[in-house]
Amino acid sequence: MDTLEVQRRLVALFVVGCLMLGYPLLTVYSVPQTIGGIPVLYVVIFVIWAVLIGASAAILHRATGGDSGGA
């Protein structure tokens, strides 16, 4: 994968992340309910955050050919 394509994917992921974590969408989850004692809004923010990190890791992993460079 060339660097321009990787940059485009990461920028697109950034834009999607900004939209997902933006005020208008998060107000949908601002309800007085809990999941396992944790407010729904906090769970949604954490899940979105984790998915964004996983997606960025997958994009960069594919870009480097899957070589972790570690031992």
Image: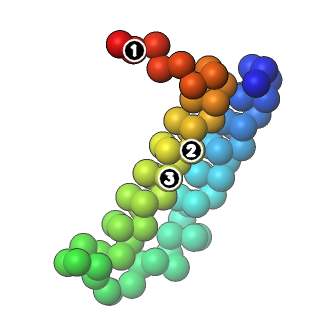
Residue under circle 3?
51
**Label 2 packing within 10 angstroms: few (<14), some (14-19), many (20+):** some
Name the one closer to the observer, 38 or 28.
38
| Circle 2: residue type | Ala
Q: Position of residue 24 (x, y in %)?
A: 58, 70
**Label 3 packing within 10 angstroms: few (<14), some (14-19), many (20+):** few
Residue under circle 2?
55
In terms of secondary structure, where does tag 1 sit? loop
In terms of secondary structure, where does tag 3 sit? helix
Q: Looking at the image, do the residues carrying marks 2 and 3 touch, with CB atoms under 8 Å apart?
A: yes
Residue under circle 1?
70
| Circle 3: residue type | Val
Number of numbered discs: 3
Give the Cα distance between marks 1 and 2: 21 Å
Q: Position of residue 63 (x, y in %)?
A: 66, 25
Does 5 sit above or below residue 64? below
Question: Residue at the location (31% across, 86% down)?
Answer: 33
Question: Residue at the location (53% across, 19% down)?
Answer: 67
- Work out which residue is located at the far left of the displayed protein and give it: 37
Does 67 sit above or below residue 9? above
Quadrant assignment, res 66: top right
